Image: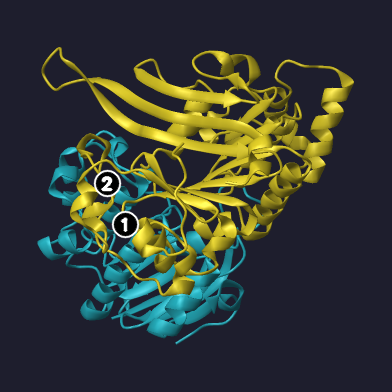
Amino acid sequence: MDVGRLDREILKIRNLTVSFIQYEKNTFHKSALPVISDLGMTVCEGDVTAVVGSSGSGKSVLAHALFGLLPQNTFVDGEISYSGRTLQPDGAALLRGREIALIPQGVNCLDPLMKAGKQILNGKRDRLSVLRMRELFEKYGLAQEVERQYPSELSGGMARRVLLITALMNRPKLIVADEPTTGMEEALAKTVLADFRDFADEGNGVLLITHDLRMALTVADRIVVFYAGTVVEDAPADDFASEELLRHPYTKALWRAMPEHGFSAEPGVQPYAGERKKGCLFAPRCPYRATACGGEIPMVFVREGRARCVRCEEINQNVWRGDGE
Amino acid sequence: MRLYAERISYRYPEAAAEVLSDVSFAMENTEMNILVGPSGCGKTTLGRILAGYQRPSAGNVFLDERPLPRKGYCPVQMVWQHPEMAVNPRVKMQKVLDEGNADEHTIRGLGIEKDWCGRYPQELSGGELQRFCIARAIGKGTRFLIADEISVMLDPITQSQIWTFLLKELKEREIGLILISHDPCLITYLKGRYSMKMIAMPELSGHTVG
């Protein structure tokens, strides 16, 4: 990774592991269900970093872990730091809603009993805040009367814009957006993404969480691919121009499955959190599978990115090995 | 079999304007059509009416000259955009599957694993749930399938897995398809590959067909 990126790191996650503690069936024994394991990634100032992966890969859990919003029965280990300050375990509570803002996935995150305007202002009544809200309303094409409407009176797209405006109110430095454009029509989705782009270009960080690879590619600088609770590849978005430039077999499969690249359907599904074994979790579906895939899988640096695959170097030429992360 | 909607109008209760006004539509069960139009133009509403989930304010839906059956298995089935809202959250997935009459071949073809059937909907991902919803909808009596944005919430691999199986199945069993989608790449691909016809919503209003 180039040195310039290291200076600009705004969010850094290292060796993050998140498990849900559950009671085993019909017993008083507790066991841990790991949903994220040994995850590392960074978000830089000025960059839109997209996390892509199928549902169940741990994308939303990551977002909630960053903001300290996970339920009581979770065990979180690892290091999360924002501009050098640690967010884990309690740091996030001081910063969230101020310097770091989350745009949650579910529109049911809105309080059903509070009018939209009141939720956005979050207790503030001063003129500046109200003006800021109105300015954002105008920017995102919401009529002023939406201020006085309850969430149940809003359409899906409108509710999503209310969530977006809530996040932008306090001019954060880092936005984590969890599936921010699902349910929006194309033109509006493009506006929202363009705004993330502008927001990043002003020197802020954006972590965009999505399952829609094509949408992510239109706006992101880096793509981080999740599979079964960990990062399998971290690549510059430009590498998605062709399959050869991609590192991990799963990313290649994702690329081939896009309608414009052949729509090829590889069989198999991502293993469920309770059934994840040692070694590479993609191995059962991988065309490059080898015996080494059952062991420890290191992160390998390939060109401007990295991938978690033992055969990565054979699959890709022109490689250098980093000294681990 | 022929699915025929005759001069359908629909107005949501208390809404000022009609979503659908004087819409006519006809297709054979060997056809595959893509329904397109701007958001809010009534694509989903038309789908709901064709599948018998909603009754039009005016007009009728016919299947081979007979009105759409109000009881028993409806030959026009619909798969919804949000699978998590289309299954009962309080029953296990086996029961969801039993609501249709999917055979072993369909279940296997959609990659539904035995083990998933014992779980509740909230324990499955959107892609896994959508497989159940499709299996439930393409049971033995189905002659038409309305697919309303069924793959927007899926990652590319799951999307292509589901479509590949579904289209093969529909072709073999001569089930007619009405696809509602906004995804330009998906539309381009399917249109070229399966000679689907594009139908723009606004063109359906005003004149009768067939």
Q: Is residue A235 left or right of residue B176?
A: right
Q: Earlier in the sequence, mark 1 or mark 2?
A: 2
Q: What chain is the yellow one?
A: A
Q: Nearer the viewer, residue A16 or A152?
A: A16
- Judged from the image, the secondary structure of the residue bearing numbered disc 2 is loop
Residue sitting at x 24%, y 43% = A279
| Image coordinates for residue A320, horizontal then vertical, percent | 47, 53
Residue sitting at x 28%, y 51% = A282
- Judged from the image, the secondary structure of the residue bearing numbered disc 1 is loop
Task: Single out the mark in the foreground, 1 or 2.
Answer: 1
Number of the label disc, if any, that sits on residue A281: 2
Point out the image quarter for the C terminus of chain B. Answer: bottom left
Number of the label disc, if any, that sits on residue A311: 1
Number of the label disc, if any, that sits on residue B208: none
User: What type is the residue that disc 2 sits on?
Assistant: Leu
Q: Is residue A59 left or right of residue A147?
A: left
Give the vertical position of A137 relative to A286 (above or below): above
Residue sitting at x 43%, y 32% = A61
Chain B as rendered: colour: cyan
| Image coordinates for residue B135, horizontal then vertical, percent | 23, 58
Give the vertical position of B204 relative to B121 (above or below): below
Q: Is residue A263 left or right of residue A179?
A: left
